Amino acid sequence: MSRLPVVYLPHGGGPWPFVDMPMFGDLSGMRSYLEGLRHLAEPRAVLVISAHWEAPVPTVQTAAEPPLLFDYYGFPKESYELTWPAPGNPELASRVRELLSAAGLESAEDASRGFDHGTFIPLKLTWPDPKIPTIQLSLKNGLNAAYHVAMGRALEPLRDEGVLILGSGMSYHNMRGFGSALEVSKQFDNWLGETAALDQAARDDRLANWEQAPGARQCHPREEHLLPLMVIAGAAGADVGTVPYSEVAMGVQLSAIHFG
């Protein structure tokens, strides 16, 4: 089996593709991008690092049939009736923990955790018929960038084992800035694209020090939506990043980054 790519994708806001949410404006470009991911690869399993799960140590989802975790609030009733019954993969969960342990990283598991909206909302577009086994891996409390790059580096072997690694977040995430921060979001977005295209050592160094980027804290007052990119970049190895999706949406520049 050939090596699979790794992907950092935007998951949008709340249940946006499946309910009427005119306040978000036109998100047809993001929708088309997420739908198109189904043609990127044919994985045997998917591992998602979502911005919406943090734990004391990296924690992996082990349920054989994970439920949905409706971790958004104030949306129409139908948004809490969505379904996406992808199977879990306890064996993959064990493999993830094995790789983290080999890298000297402590981990844990959670048998009750469901798919949060950072997973089931975008992937319901990508795979509306959810047959591919899917699991989530949490971020680590403290949100240290270099640590999350190291997490990804530990997981790189999964790419040669038929596992598609996805980081689900947003390249811009400041709730007060949506609709009014276009210029600063463009500056930070350009920095992300330039960083992804660097060699591995330079890329890892820049990501570990991401707060030095132009507009960094204006775009990410809290970095949980950026940290999945650090994991993805770590798993990228020597691959150079590309930006297959980038557009102005919700009044800011948003992008996806792929490696491999």
Image (spheres, grey):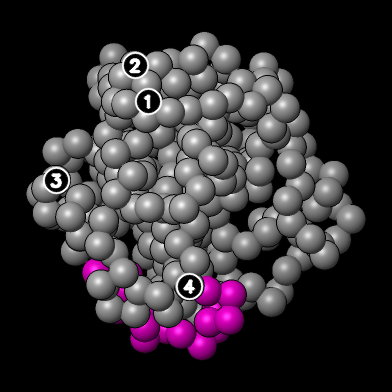
What residue span does the magenta drawing correspond to?
174-191
Residue drawn 34% across the image and 79% down it: 215
Asked which secondary structure carries label 2, the reply is helix
Residue 161 — which label? Answer: 2
Question: In the image, is 215 to the left or to the right of 25?
Answer: left
Residue linked to disc 1: 100
Judge whether residue 178 is colored magenta.
yes
Residue 160, given in percent of the width and then of the height, sits at 28, 19
* Mark earlier in primary sequence (2, 1): 1
Reply above or below: 255 against 101: below
Residue drawn 80% across the image and 52% down it: 79
Residue drawn 46% across the image and 53% down it: 142
* Mark earlier in primary sequence (1, 3): 1
* Tag 1: amino acid: Leu
Residue drawn 49% across the image and 66% down it: 222
Residue linked to disc 3: 200
Q: CA distance from mark 4 to mark 3?
A: 26 Å
Q: CA distance from mark 2 to mark 1?
A: 16 Å
- Give neighbour class at mark 3: few <14, some 14-19, many 20+ (Cα, 10 Å): some
Question: In the image, is 136 to the left or to the right of 182?
Answer: right
* Tag 3: amino acid: Gln
Residue 122, given in percent of the width and then of the height, sits at 58, 47
The image quadrant of residue 7 is top left
